[in-house]
């Protein structure tokens, strides 16, 4: 690519929500008391709208450029200039980050608007929107960062904000614990990210080009091909370490356990964090460093394997859940698995496209579940729902459209993105037939449990008035009681309008990347080609513009499709499998032709209990990791108390005894001898002093006695 074009407006995409967060965070209580909650909402929503308009403007500016020149850069200031490490605080927009910024600000803005209605009764209204704006600023820093260090600032920022948002209702222990769990699990993954970043920098320094600026890393990455680190090829070691970070942020095996618990946060938080922003950070990171991952085929194999196992594993758990948000949570984990499958088989554009489509239909599903929870006064157990399509037609319509999208039914968005992943998994040099097969089965399971949810929530008769209401109420901070005393009702317009927009996206955005087998032109893939497939970008001398690119892509894909009926066959299989899942759900939960108890009681109920209890992973973590850590801590504490402290105390006791003995010897022997000499001297002196009487005859007697003694001595 050529040198970036300077655009000083990019920083304001981040600064706008950051200013909103600062105002509400520092002055929110006063503003809310003085001007009301609408003022707080305006301070929060308007900056996100500004960010979205700036993102649209950046996108338009990119469209006007040649494909290989589509890079805008805003260098704010110098940051770290120490020896080999020279990193500026700079933000970059290219075709990849443009997609991410539009998703984050566009869908994030709709979620902000929805939150105005959903959280209106919340006393800490100002605090919620301060956190929400701060999260937006952190996520935008992540996707706009020109260097890995800037990206990592946003990476850590979204982790911190997710802790605050998930545990927003911190007075309830479950919510506070869920926030802490998300924070701790992400720190484990982040350690891998840091190790990978340090190893990458070391390798580049050894190669004579130490840098952490992504554009410069891409330029010098070929120099790392022959380097090793701890017995691994350096690109393999670096990418595996970075992938550990991705498994934390994007909830993959084994670090996925935080995401289902994160449903304890308010529903808009679930939609923002777990549909369009934070959980996609790992996928975006791999896309951003695709040139590095392409140098490590072993890492790609690990990424694809972990992705498909996570997708299947989470989908089977979703089959048996009754909490409306938990079903969507495991669905998110599963869909993220599909994205990693795409990245692992080298189909980076397909992975980003599924990220894009998923943002629309999953945000709609989460917000739709929030609309249901709001209407049922914070009921979340699907067994206490039913028949809601009569009471909530807008929520039902949008939820149904998004469910068709996630199930992969044509012509909805999920069909185009998921089918592309399955096709690439089967045909890519990095793919394998078993990945395609397990992915197709998972797609069928997804269609089943999502339509199970639709039929349980919206079809049949309303069961809330007759239920025992012993379900989960994790989103019930300040909830109303007496569920059976209230009829369900449609949510206000401020909540349903975002649902309609998102459902429209779930229906239409798939047409941005219609495959060649259906006469399309892979427009989305063409747009990303300069970043994700730089070797395939259109040459600079050709007429520029998106139309010309689409024409070239269409010619190539149609020519290929005409000679490859396999694509049609695989496409038909995936649709039939998804349709089978929908049909099974309809027979079981809408028509009642098949009793769900038949499956739950099979093989003594062991398979059902296993998936219902989420394969006991949390219990295994508790027994092995948590209790193991506590046991190790207690053992080390006992070792410290008995052995280490015993040695220290023993040495102290011996030292004290030696000191006491030394003191006694000094007191009784040394001091005793000195005192004895002194006493004898005093006694002799006293005796001698008695002779000093002052009488002359006394002295004469002494002289005579002395003379006699001397003479006697000489005679002897």
Image: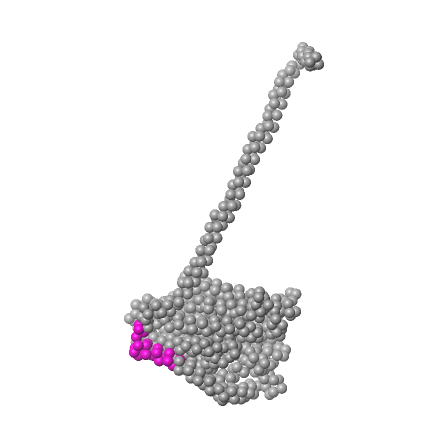
Q: Residue at x 46, y 76 (%)?
A: 435
Locate residue 134 relative to residue 82 in the image: left or right.
left
Taking depth in this image into account, of 123 and 678 the one nearest to the observer is 678
* Residue range of the region highlighted in magenta in the rendering: 578-598
Q: Quadrant of the C terminus?
A: top right
Q: Does residue 500 show up?
A: no
> In the current view of this chain or complex, which residue is farthest to the left?
466
At x 66%, y 14%, the residue is 694
Is-magenta flag for residue 7? no
388 vs 170, left or right, is: left
Considering only vertical position in the picture, is 624 above or below 383?
Answer: above
Q: Does the segment drawn in magenta span residue 590?
A: yes
Q: Nearer the viewer, residue 539 or 443?
A: 443
Percent across and percent down for residue 669 are 57, 30
On the question of residue 569 being in view, the answer is yes
Picture coordinates of residue 230, whole percent (x, y): 57, 65
Q: Give the image quarter of residue 79.
A: bottom right
Task: Note whether 650 is above or below 483 in the view shown.
Answer: above
Residue 587 rendering spot, x and y as whole percentages: 32, 79
């Amino acid at each position: 690519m050529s040198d970036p074009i300077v655009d000083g407006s990019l920083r304001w995409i981040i600064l706008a929500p950051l200013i909103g967060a600062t105002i509400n965070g520092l002055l929110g209580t006063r503003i809310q008391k003085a001007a009301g909650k609408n003022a707080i909402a305006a301070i929060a929503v308007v900056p996100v709208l500004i960010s979205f308009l700036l993102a649209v403007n950046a996108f338009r500016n990119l469209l006007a450029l040649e494909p290989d020149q589509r890079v805008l850069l805003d260098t704010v200031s110098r940051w770290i200039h120490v020896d080999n490490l020279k990193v500026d605080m700079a933000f970059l927009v290219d075709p990849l980050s443009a997609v991410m910024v539009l998703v984050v600000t566009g869908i994030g803005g709709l979620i902000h608007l929805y939150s105005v209605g959903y959280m209106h009764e919340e006393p800490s209204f100002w605090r919620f929107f301060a956190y929400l704006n701060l999260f937006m600023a952190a996520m935008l820093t992540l996707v706009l960062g020109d260097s890995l260090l800037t990206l990592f600032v946003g990476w850590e920022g979204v982790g911190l904000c997710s802790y605050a948002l998930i545990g927003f209702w911190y007075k309830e222990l479950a919510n506070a614990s869920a926030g802490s769990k998300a924070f701790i699990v992400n720190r484990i993954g982040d350690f891998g990210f840091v190790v990978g970043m340090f190893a990458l920098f070391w390798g580049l320094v050894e190669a004579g080009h130490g840098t952490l600026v992504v554009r410069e890393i891409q330029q010098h990455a070929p120099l790392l091909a022959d380097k090793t680190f701890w017995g691994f090829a350096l690109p393999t070691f670096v990418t595996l370490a970075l992938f550990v970070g991705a498994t934390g942020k994007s909830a993959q095996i084994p670090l996925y356990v935080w995401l289902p618990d994160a449903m304890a946060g308010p529903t808009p938080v679930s939609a923002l964090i777990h549909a369009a922003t934070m959980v996609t950070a790992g996928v975006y990171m791999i896309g951003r460093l695709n040139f590095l991952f392409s140098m490590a085929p072993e890492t790609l194999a690990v990424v694809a394997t972990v992705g498909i196992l996570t997708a299947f594993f989470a989908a089977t758990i979703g089959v048996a859940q009754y909490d409306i948000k938990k079903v969507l949570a495991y669905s998110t984990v599963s869909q993220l698995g599909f994205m990693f499958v795409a990245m692992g088989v080298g189909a980076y554009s397909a992975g980003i496209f599924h990220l894009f489509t998923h943002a629309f239909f999953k945000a709609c599903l989460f917000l739709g579940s929030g609309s249901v929870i709001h209407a049922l006064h914070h009921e979340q157990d699907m067994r206490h729902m039913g028949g809601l399509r009569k009471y909530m037609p807008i929520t039902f319509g949008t939820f149904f459209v998004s469910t068709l999208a996630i199930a992969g039914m044509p012509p909805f968005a999920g069909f185009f993105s998921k089918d592309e992943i399955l096709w690439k998994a089967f045909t890519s040099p990095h793919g394998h037939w078993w990945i395609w097969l397990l992915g197709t089965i998972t797609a069928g399971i997804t269609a089943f449990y999502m339509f199970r949810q639709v039929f349980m929530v919206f079809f049949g008769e309303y069961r809330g008035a007759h239920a025992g209401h012993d379900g989960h109420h994790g989103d019930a901070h300040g909830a109303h009681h007496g569920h059976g005393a209230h009829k369900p009702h449609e949510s206000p317009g401020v909540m349903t309008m975002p649902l309609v927009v998102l459902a429209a996206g779930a229906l239409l955005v798939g047409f941005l990347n219609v495959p060649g087998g259906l006469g399309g032109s892979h427009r989305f893939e063409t747009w990303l080609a300069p970043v994700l497939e730089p070797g395939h970008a259109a040459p600079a001398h050709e007429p520029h513009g998106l139309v010309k690119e689409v024409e070239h892509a269409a010619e190539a894909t149609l020519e290929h499709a005409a000679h490859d009926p396999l694509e049609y066959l695989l496409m038909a299989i995936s649709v039939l499998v998804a349709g089978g899942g929908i049909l099974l759900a309809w027979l079981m939960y809408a028509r009642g032709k098949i009793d769900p108890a038949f499956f739950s009681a099979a093989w003594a109920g062991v398979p059902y209990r296993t998936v219902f209890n989420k394969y006991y992973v949390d219990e295994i973590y508790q027994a092995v990791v948590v209790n193991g850590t506590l046991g190790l801590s207690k053992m080390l504490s006992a070792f410290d108390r008995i052995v280490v402290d015993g040695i220290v105390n023993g040495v102290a006791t011996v030292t004290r005894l030696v000191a006491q003995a030394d003191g006694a010897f000094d007191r009784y022997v040394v001091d005793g001898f000195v005192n004895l000499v002194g006493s004898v001297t005093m006694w002799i002196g006293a005796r001698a002093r008695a002779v000093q009487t002052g009488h002359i005859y006394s002295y004469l007697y002494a002289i005579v006695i002395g003379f006699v003694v001397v003479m006697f001595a000489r005679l002897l």
